[in-house]
Amino acid sequence: MVLVAIVLVSLVTNILIHKEFEKYAKEQQKTRIADIVANLVHHYNYPDQKWDFEFVHGVGMLALYDGYIIRLLDPDDNVIFDAEKQDTRACAQVEKDITERMEKKRPGLKGSFVSHEQELKWNNQKIGRIVIQHYGPYFLSEGDFRFLDSLNILLVALGILALLCSLTAAGFLARRISRPVIKTAYIATQIAEGNYKIRFDGDIRTRELGELVSAVNHMAVSLDNQEQMRRRLTNDIAHELRTPLAAVASHLETMIEGVWDPTLERLQSCYEEIERITGLVSALEQQARLESDNLRLEKTSVDLLELAHTVAGNFESESFKKKVAVFVSGEETRINADRDKLNQVLANLLSNAIKFTPENGQVRITVSDTHHTALITVEDNGIGIPKGELPLIFDRFYRTDKSRNRLTGGTGIGLTIARSIVSAHKGTIEAESEAEYGSRFTVTLPKA
């Protein structure tokens, strides 16, 4: 592109300069003829009505060397001065030199020698007639052509210099662009092969390339997190299924071998373990259904404050046994949403709050209204969540209770389901917590 631009600029500049120089040559030709005529008239001896032959001869020979052949006549058409008669050889040589030069330098001009005739007057009285022959429509001297050739050489030299500079700059920019692009392509290949730990390290000063590198690094981080989540999910599901299956298998094996009698209590224990597995599978099915594109919301007008009172009433017995006070406050806020699914969200949040709040603790549900959104806040003063675990609490099967004691934790999928329902409503759910100081979950829902 730079090369094409330089060539085009050089060509256009050259053409324009030559066009302007041609106009200049034509104007100079007219000016020179006018000067010759003025000089001759100015030196006409009017009282004697005679021409100064010596002066006329000097002007004529000087004009000849400039390419103008003069013939001066008096009012009666008598020849006073004729350059061709004065120096026939010089006139022929001038015509030959100019014609050859113009045909060589300007072959497309197709010019020739033409005559310019003009009457000469002094005080409105005719004093003679002049005939000037010159090459038309214009002609240039050797000096003019040397000037144009020097200008062309200068343009070519500047073009070559500009091209070299542009190639140097282009090479530098190409290396600056290609290196991070090649490295990014290599990193993308490594990511495609499963190396999610690789990152692009280095300072990228080009904004677009910086955005590309950031996107690739972000993709690598996301895929690495997804891989870790997949592995943890596999381990969690195996752990969740192993314990009840192992219990049922050991009980049945013992009874089959006759060590234990198949009593009602032992069969009931096996049934409870199977129910636990069934509950886990049901939770997974529900989560898959909520995250699918086919999730359908039955939206109606819902009063969130009334819904909060209803959910708090449903947990009255559980909070009473735990000696946890549940308070509901706020203002009447109506939105267009699926009441049953929002009920499930609030139930999950309130259940966790009561479960992880010690005796004599408090849980507060607050409903607030903004111009375009509604907020539901569930806050407790329980055991809280460590800061490092906050980003993980919405993942499947994640529980801050590392012992996985089912007295303090369920399947670890409640918050995942809550997030899916809120996302289906085009809302957000956020968690704030500090270990030993309690937690606060904020659900933001659009009104429409």
Image (cartoon, rainbow, N blue to C red):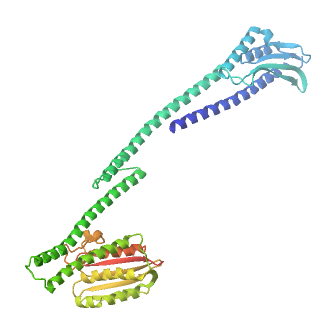
Q: Quadrant of residue 406?
A: bottom left
Residue farthest along the left direction in this orientation? 259
Left or right placement of residue 30 versus residue 365 in this view = right
Query: Is 68 placed above or below 239 here?
Result: above
Residue 258: image location, x then y, percent: 8, 79
Q: Is any part of residue 367 visible from this angle?
A: yes
Question: Residue 150: where, in percent of width, then height?
Answer: 58, 25
The tally of labels here is 0
* Residue drawn 63% across the image and 23% down it: 145
Residue 90 coordinates in the image, percent (x, y): 73, 10
Tell which of 306 and 117 is nearer to you. Answer: 306
Residue found at x 21% / y 87%: 359
Q: Is residue 100 above or below residue 442?
A: above
Q: Quadrant of residue 105?
A: top right
Q: Residue at x 80, y 24 (%)?
A: 38
* Nearest the eye: 43 or 282: 282
Left or right: where does residue 160 sit relative to residue 233? right
Position of residue 75 measured from the top left corner of the image (x, y, whole percent): 91, 18
Image-quadrant location for residue 172: top left
**Do we see residue 432 in this rendering?**
no
Viewer-proximal residue among 95 and 118: 95
x 29%, y 71%: residue: 396
On the picture, is 344 further left or further right than 31? left
